[in-house]
Amino acid sequence: MRFVFHIGRYFMFLNRVFKRPEKFKIFVKQFFKEAEKLGTNSVGIVVIISVFMGAVITLQTAYNLDMAFIPKYTIGLAARESVLLEFSSTIVGLIMAGKVGSNIASEIGSMKVTEQIDAIEIMGINSSSFLVLPKILALVFMMPLLTVISMGIGISGGWIAGFVSGEVPSTDYIYGIQYSFKPFYIVYSVIKSAVFGFLISSISSYQGYYVEGGSLEVGIASTKAVVVSSVQIILFNLLLTQLLLA
Amino acid sequence: MIEVRNVNKTFNKKQILFDVSAKFEAGQTNLIIGQSGHGKTVLLKSIVGLHSIDSGEIIYGNKVFSGMSFTDQKEIRQQIGMLFQGSALFDSLTVEENVKFPLDMFSNKSTEEKLDRVNFCLNRVNLENVNHLYPSEISGGMQKRVAIARAIALNPKYLFCDEPNSGLDPKTSIVIDNLIYEITKEYGITTIMNTHDMNSVMAIGEKIIYIHSGRKLWEGNKEDILVAKEKELNDFVFASELFKRIKRNV
Ligand SMILES: Nc1ncnc2c1ncn2[C@@H]1O[C@H](COP(=O)(O)OP(=O)(O)OP(=O)(O)O)[C@@H](O)[C@H]1O
Ligand SMILES: [Mg+2]
């Protein structure tokens, strides 16, 4: 029953969020501020995670395919496919759910409990649209960028790990990552990451916006934001894979 | 003028306000008083439309405000300034940006004109050299004053104050009370203020309504309140030692 209640309220919330902004100039300013806060400031963590992700995928593939009749370049090929198809978008999604999701929920939640949202509303400004729309659009815009960065860094990480460990010769790896390359896989991941961006920002904003109480409840809301967005990312990952690749 | 007619309000099946009616005139400080938890904030937020009411009417001038859509309420809302119980300043913005916020959203003034207005409002509440500080960097009393400055930035016709001096020392409380009183007189604003501080009541209470358990038990002015007969009101008014002594003397 709670589930049905939340779904209903979530869609009503979105209906209020997607309204024309009060002042376009201010909206544009907020959009870039959020893009920087939510996106640009997350490049560091995405880079670190991606290097190691690529390295681990390459090494594990190398150890598992350590047979004479399998050519070495297949390792590069396998690493590329894993990173492009699955790891970059999903891992970046989950990382961002943790980093940005809790940030959004606690920011909006504390504005709620300290009556800052009431203060916006009282002026006749639609507070949900004013606060949330720039966040959603900024994250939907930034997530694909982060994912593409992650792809590049992940594949490079694999290459470095391959030749440093001596498991995969550089020329084989580079041949492998170019072998029967399908550009659609990048498009597919970019679509997925945009959807993840929407899920993270809208779910976390929703959690923050309906906080009642004090700082304790804000903490609970931000934990919920991370958990619910992560679960939704996993669910939609499956759904989109069926839809786009089947 | 603001009129409240037979307002009822329920939260999760618990009724908070019972058939409250009152009239609040322009150019005077109207006080809503009562014990903690008896529904003052709920009443104030119902009047400004932050809570939707179950039944009854809220009337601004000659317009029925309750029941209007959010879009229709906009015109009236832009004439409302509100001071919240906890100041409610935007903590990601500086003092100057806080006061400028309503101007940015609703006026077509140039940046210079807006800054002039911001400085005028900050001056009016006796704040100087705090423009570039954040709310967390100034004292509670200063935050209240910034909140007043923000509330009057757009020259409101209606001013709402929810316990403007809770948590402040007696001297600062008087400063805030006087400020609200002066602004009300200067601009002929309809001011409604919540308080449980009898000092404020005696200082600036031109019209007072007493709320007890969500019902309006009494209304009158600050002279009447000392000689009122109602037991609950008496218990409230003469709760402090100071006022008990006053009672013995009158
Ligand atoms: N959003 C809400 N949801 C449910 N109950 C609420 C809500 N807001 C207030 N109440 C309840 O309404 C009652 C009156 O609260 P209100 O905040 O109006 O008191 P108050 O007179 O302003 O007290 P104080 O002087 O402490 O500020 C309380 O019992 C409170 O629990
Ligand atoms: Mg209150």
Image (tube, rainbow, N blue to C red):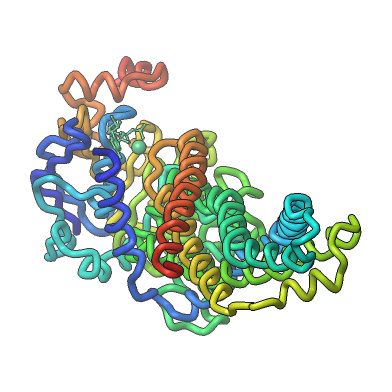
In this rendered view, identify the residue nearer to me: B126 or A173: A173
Of the four image quadrants, the one with ligand 1 is top left
Query: Is residue B131 shown to the viewer in this render?
Result: no
In this rendered view, identify the residue nearer to me: A148 or A206: A148
Q: Is residue A139 above or below residue B191?
A: below
Quarter occupied by residue A37:
bottom right
The residue positioned 13% from the left and 41% from the top of the image is B8
- Residue B108 vs residue B185: left or right? right
- Residue B241 vs residue B228: left or right? right
Q: Work out which quarter of the rendered image holds the C terminus of chain B and state it.
A: top left
Query: Is residue B93 shown to the viewer in this render?
Result: yes
Q: Is residue A242 above or below residue A97?
A: below
- Residue B90 vs residue B108: left or right? right
Q: Position of residue B2 (x, y in %)?
A: 19, 56
Q: Position of residue B239 (x, y in %)?
A: 34, 19
The residue positioned 72% from the left and 70% from the top of the image is A152
Quarter occupied by residue B164:
top left
Q: Position of residue A239 (x, y in %)?
A: 40, 59
In this rendered view, identify the residue nearer to me: A33 or B201: A33
The residue positioned 67% from the left and 60% from the top of the image is A42
- Residue B48 vs residue B186: left or right? left
User: Residue pushed farthest front?
Assistant: A69
The residue positioned 26% from the left and 30% from the top of the image is B38
Q: Position of residue B115 (x, y in %)?
A: 56, 75
Q: Is residue A3 above or below residue A48?
A: above
Q: Work out which quarter of the rendered image holds the N terminus of chain B and state it.
A: bottom left
